[in-house]
Structures are given as structure tokens and as C-alpha cells.
Amino acid sequence: MKYLEAVTLGEVDTMLLEAFVKFAPQMASEIERLTRLRFFVVDRSDYHSEWTGASWGRSLEPLPIDIDGLGDTAAYLRRSTHRPPLTSVEIKGGQGLQLVAERVSKNQVTQGVALVSGLLESCVAKGVTLRVGCRVAGIFGKESGARSVEFAADGASHRVEARSVVIASGGFEWNKQMKAAFLSCVDDGAASPPWNEGDGLRIGLSEGAAVANMTQAWWSAAFRVPGEMYDGKQLVRNIVRELALPGSILVNADGARFANECSSYNALGKAFQVFDPSRNSYINKRAWLVFDQRFKEAYSVATVSASTPAPDWFITGDSSDQLAAKAGINPEGLSQTLQRFNGFVAAGHDFDFGRGEAKHDQYHGDKSMPHANLGEIAVPPFHAVPIFLGNLGTKGGLKTTVDGAVLDMDGDLLPGLFACGNAAASWMGPGYPGAGGSLGPIMTSAFLCGSAAAKVAGGSNLLH
């Protein structure tokens, strides 16, 4: 509780945090009881590893699972554009193409796809009816509590009666109007499917629902590979490990570092939003990952393998001044930053931001090097990859009780209406506690929400 209260900056109702602490273990156990999913403990620290109450090994991840039980429903699964069918531990350990091929031959999936697959398989086994290719037009029955949902499909309008309606339609990170109204103007792209347009939020607002946490998102440093598309939109990728490996830094247009590059991606994202009143600008809005040829030949960077020549969209210069000129970075500022940073490397300590001091920092570092997170940047040519503030989804949404019941502007319940996932206001407020710190609270709140909605509809209650 102490750790979660610090992470959420005191902006989240204590009852929500207490519910997470109490019911998260039961949620995970019930999933293992009711599905074929099995979880393993990821051997890593919480994101703020040095804070009071932080711990190690609190993140869970699904073991690989086959999708044979899904039948035709397997066609509904989204596959990751970012990761092969390996666990996070296998990816970090450098597992290769042979294991990937083996997984593909066995129809096995991992990580988020595995989680969705296992849950979906159990829904199918329970006789749940799936309607895809539909868009909800509205939810009715506010006064009576006898809810109905109207949706469009195959060119016609349909209506389904329901005692309980759960809005779980994701966030609003692809809705330009909502982003302009609520989110930071620095944010420049979402690394999520481009169909999260805030439909559930819009419907909830039309019902008189209250909202919370609307200025927050699951922030992350991000980049784009030119021409890489997803569902007809330019794909956005978040970037983490390259920021922590020894021999790279993140700088702004002044050529200055502005944060510990190893920080958790949500915390690092906030550093992009710093406003300098004397210059009337967000001074970290434009940023670059800067590294040298040694780093390029040692690590995969922004999808480009160590053995692949630097692509045209990498900015490359024979000197730091030339690199800065091409990128639009202040040359003197970059030169001074590199000299200062290389001095920190020699001293074995980052005197500006403490990079590499926390256990979390070291997780993504290279422990085979003299320092897992600090390395000299001195071997030409020098390279830069444009980096911007992206997000993995929005955190703001409909305000709910612990049970997921949607509240109106006066704090009263909207009968029969529930919300969970990124359509509801996040239980983590402005923070991100650790790996799985979005999904864990979301799944716990969904567990409570589903149980409450089922009870309203005459079903059994899973809670104990």
C-alpha cells in the first residue's frame, strides 16, 4: 500500500488501491482455475525499485499456450507487431529463430496474445456469443435500469436487451477531438490498435457519467519506422531497452539530456512534457536517441539489428557536430553533453540523473559490460534516431466504484451500467507500479466488475 500510494501521488481513492491488493491474487488464481492459462513470476523489480514498499518478482506473465481450442475464433486474435512468440524472459535471454519456428509449428502464442487466447477460449467454451464488425450506437434504459444496447451491423440497426451492460471498449487515444480536449499537446502518437476512438467514453458521457484521470495516459518514449503501417495507419513503437544499454543517451534540441533514460517508460514520458516559461515552449518535445558506431554494432536499435547497416532514416554524422547539424540539434550543446556524459562513464556514476543506480535500471542494461547502463559515446560515425512522446493507451475514463459500477456527476450509480479496462478511469492514476502495472489493476477491476454485473443479471458471485 505504501508503494502504491507513492506511485499514484495520492490521487487515487484508497479503496481502489486496497481492492487491488486484496483481490489481485484471487483474480489470478481464478483465471488459472477457469482457463488453461498458467502464469509464471517474472524475475524483475518494481519500476521504482528503491522506493519504500517496492519489491521484486510481483509481475506475472502467461506461459506459452496453443490456440487449437479456439477453432474459427482464432481469426479474431490480434497478433503483436512488436514481439515474436517468445516470453519476455526468452526475448531478454536472446532466444532465436529456432524456438520461434517451434512455437509457430505448435500454434503457440505468448504474452498478451496468450492471455487473450486463454480468456477467449473459455468464453467460447461457456457459449458466449461474439459479435464482431459491429459498432455500438448507444445504450438505453437509464431511467428504468432495464438496459438495451443498440449497434450497427451489416447495414442494419440491432438492439439487444440486457440487465447489465459493461463498457470495456478501450481508451480514446485515436480520437483527435478527445485528445485535443484532454491530453498533453506534446503527445504525438499511440502504439495501440487504431480503433480505440473513445466510443465507450462517448456513450458513458451521453448517459451522464462522471469521468476521472482524463489528462493521463500510459506514456512511453516512441519512434516510427518510415512506411511501417498497421491497420492502414503509421505504426508507432515504444522504445525501452535501447535507452538503458551502455553507450546511448536521450537529448533534446538543445543537445541536453533531460532525464534518467533508464526510468520506467511512463515516468520518462512525463519528462517530455516539461514547459519552460522563459522560452514559452515544451523544451523536450523533440528528442533523439544518440549513440556511436560501437553501440550500433553491439545492439539491435529501433528494429535494426546490429549486423544491418544504418538505414536512411537513421541520422548519421562523422562527428557530433555534423550529426547535430543534420538532426537540428544544437551542436555545442550536444558536444558538451557527450563530453560530460563520457566523464560520468569514466567515473562510473551519472552525477546528473543517477542512471544505472536502481535495480530497475539494471534490468534492461548489459551486465557483461563494465557498467550495465553507462558506456562511452566516442566512436564515429555517430547516429541519432528521432524520439517523441507516445502512449500505449489512455488512462482516463468513466468513474466507477470498486465493483465497476459507473457513477454519475453527483456520485450516484447509473443503474445496470458498468465499465472496466481503459474505458474506465485507471486505478493507478498518474503512476505505473511495475511490469504488468496496467493489465494487473485492469484485470482485477474487471474481475470485480464482471462479478458484480453477473450478480445484477442473476448469476453467481465469484468473490470470496
Image (cartoon, rainbow, N blue to C red):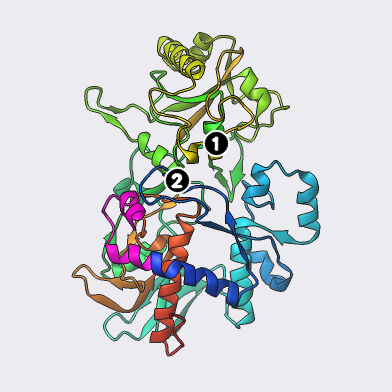
**Which quadrant would residue 136 be assigned to in this image?**
bottom left
- Sequence-wise first label, 1 or 2: 2
Residue 289: x %, y % from top left: 51, 26
- Seen in the image, is 136 located left or right of residue 101? left
Q: Quadrant location of the C terminus?
A: bottom left
Residue at figure coordinates x 71%, y 67% from the top left: 67
Disc 2 residue crowd, few under 14, some 14–19, many 20+, Cα 10 Å:
many
Residue 66: x %, y % from top left: 72, 65
Between residue 376 and residue 397, name the one nearer to us: 376
Residue at figure coordinates x 37%, y 74% from the top left: 418
Secondary structure at numbered mark 2:
loop
Prevailing secondary structure class for the magenta stretch in the rendered image: helix
- Which residue lies under the disc numbered 1? 224
Secondary structure at numbered mark 1:
loop
**Which quadrant would residue 19 be assigned to in this image?**
bottom left
Q: 3 above or below 127? A: above
- Would you say residue 203 is visible in this rendering? yes
Which amino acid is tagged 2? Tyr
Q: Tell which residue pokes out farthest to the bottom in this image.
A: 458
- Would you say residue 187 is visible in this rendering? no
Residue at figure coordinates x 49%, y 37% from the top left: 361
- Seen in the image, is 348 located left or right of residue 416? right
Residue 81: x %, y % from top left: 63, 48
Which amino acid is tagged 1? Arg
Does residue 366 belong to the magenta stretch?
no
- Which residue lies under the disc numbered 2? 47
Between residue 317 and residue 57, name the one nearer to us: 57
Does residue 17 belong to the magenta stretch?
yes
Structural distance between the alpha carbons of marks 1 and 2:
25 Å
Between residue 2 and residue 80, name the one nearer to us: 2
What count of labels does the image hold? Answer: 2
The residue segment tinted magenta is: 1-20
